[in-house]
Image (cartoon, grey):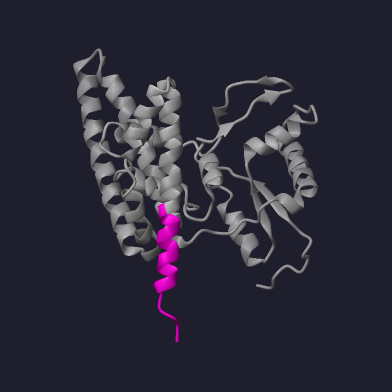
Amino acid sequence: MQPYQATATLAVCEATGGHEDILLCVLLELAIPAHRADPAKVKAYIKSFGKHAKSDPIDARWLFRYGHDRTAALPRWQPAEPCQQKLELLVARRLDLVAMRVQEQNRLKAPRSRLVADNIQAHLAELDRHIKALNAEINTLITESRDLALRVEPLRSVPGIGQVLVPLLLAVMPELGSLNRRQIASLAGVAPHPKDSGKASWHRSTTGGRRQIRPALFIAALAACRGDNPLAVAYKALLKAAKPKRVALTAIMRKIITIANARVRDALRQQNQIAPIPA
């Protein structure tokens, strides 16, 4: 297949939960640069013009305009490594099954019928079996991948990060070790953003980031604060300084992800220094 010759061409498509994968792969084979747009950003861009009409032709025109106006700033799509892609799929499926299990456990508290209760219990047993199988597959995948396995030990050395959070971080935040502390905190949704205007200065709040990470970091922060480690000491110091518990926990969440980022970065640098020189 001959590559497409128009170097000024940029294909823009929205992320649609995987339906865009075939298109992106074809564009890659044709050597056509592509950008997978965040639907929320495209929607905000359209709203900035005061437009609300929506149809497939209208959306296509807006995607064209979005790509045309922001060509220089839009990152070009590149496929992840096959091992990374598989890990992302497995972790995403595990998250789905865990969410289903929580829903079924809540329904079991008031089933209103013995038949319904038995059905829920059978479904819970099936979900547990599938989650266990996914955990085994995820662990095998990480163990057999040199790049993924290299990141496991630095992550597990951080207080609060356990066997569930490690694969989640590897799957959802492959940038760990390649960003600075401010960038990684923002990506995890735990960076404080200012809300100042003129002489008014409001409390800074955390927002944005990848939605799967923040709840997991909250659980990790709770675990770390209950242990005997420097993060627990820092948490108690924040409480002693009259900081609200919510603010103190968010600070610990930020410390966890920034420490994890630094330790992964150091492990990667050390690996590069001792890697054998190819013949």
Residue 126 rendering spot, x and y as whole percentages? 24, 37
Residue 88 visible, this angle: no
Residue at 38% x, 43% y: name it.
93
Q: Main secondary structure of the magenta part?
A: helix
From the viewer's side, name the closer residue of 173 and 104.
Answer: 173
The quarter of the picture where the N terminus appears is bottom right
Residue at 52% x, 46% y: name it.
181
From the viewer's side, name the closer residue of 268 and 74.
Answer: 268
Toward which corner of the image does residue 24 lie, by quadrant? Answer: bottom right
From the viewer's side, name the closer residue of 188 and 51.
Answer: 188
Residue 186 rendering spot, x and y as whole percentages? 55, 40
Image label count: 0
The quarter of the picture where the C terminus appears is bottom left
Residue bounds of the magenta highlight: 263-279
Residue 37 visible, this angle: yes
Toward which corner of the image does residue 250 lie, by quadrant? Answer: top left
Residue 90 rendering spot, x and y as whole percentages? 38, 49
